[in-house]
Amino acid sequence: MNSITDTPESNYDMLTITEATLIQKNLREQLNLKPLQSPIRTIAGADISLSLYSETVYAGMVILSFPDLQPVAYSLVKSSTTFPYVPGFLAFREIPSLLKVYEQIPVKPDVIMFDGNGIIHKRRMGIASHFGVLTDSVTMGCAKKKLTGQYEDPGENRGEYSLLTDKGETIGYVLRSKNNVKPVFISPGHNMSLDDSLNIAMKCIHKYRLPEPTRKAHEFVNLFRTGELKEGYHEIGSLQLF
């Protein structure tokens, strides 16, 4: 096999839900939630734009310096999927395109933050965990909605948080990222701990609800979808356009 995208796991369109469930269970056995071992110098935000009934996927990662969170490069890919829209299995619609995005990046980011869940998932295999295990990268999730679990609302002030639990296990945090707005759901994906995911998320919050990596990824992917940015890997350097 010559690349990440040649792996059998990335050929998801042909899978049944039963087969997809088995893949999630197998990947879970490889999940690593031990504390980070290396310093963070770059962090990427990952996002896709995919309509509910569309087969066209616009996928991207924006790499930011850390901790000052300035965009330094981005990778964009237009692809397609025919895997059905099934809650709990959305990663199978998004992962193949994001693998292509990741493969284009010559120097991989130290951490990838996904607009989706890590272990906040019935089988602990949200998109951040799924992608992290496949690529053995350091990943985390920052989602606008939870896939499973229970929690009490955190305080209304920015930076306040509560625990998200499932069957007695803490699987993430409910973080108030901006005063008096809906919280976001933070969890480790792979190769980091629960505490790591919260600490990194806290450092990535500026004045918006979404942390800067996923906010920028969303912004760049939308610019790509409207034709204002081109497919491929591009370095931004010192030119700050966004």
Image (cartoon, rainbow, N blue to C red):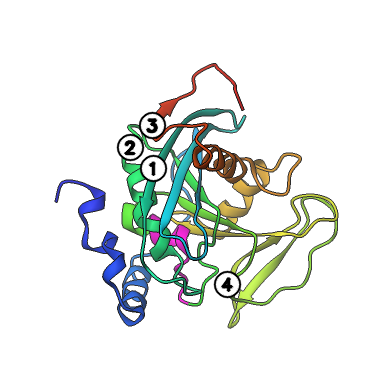
The C terminus appears in which quarter of the rendering?
top right
Q: Which residue is mark 1?
A: 77
- Secondary structure of the residue carrying numbered label 3: strand
Please identify the quarter of the rendering in which residue 15 is found.
bottom left
CA gap, disc 3 to disc 1?
9 Å
Q: Earlier in the sequence, mark 3 or mark 1?
A: 1
Which span is picked out in magenta? Answer: 123-132
Q: Which residue is mark 4?
A: 147
- Secondary structure of the residue carrying numbered label 1: strand
Q: Is residue 34 magenta?
A: no
Percent x, y for residue 162? 73, 65
Total number of numbered discs in the rendering: 4
CA gap, disc 1 to disc 2?
9 Å
Q: Which residue is mark 2?
A: 104
- Residue type at mark 1 is Val
Please report contact status of discs 3 and 2: CB closer than 8 Å, yes or no.
Answer: yes
- Residue type at mark 4 is Leu
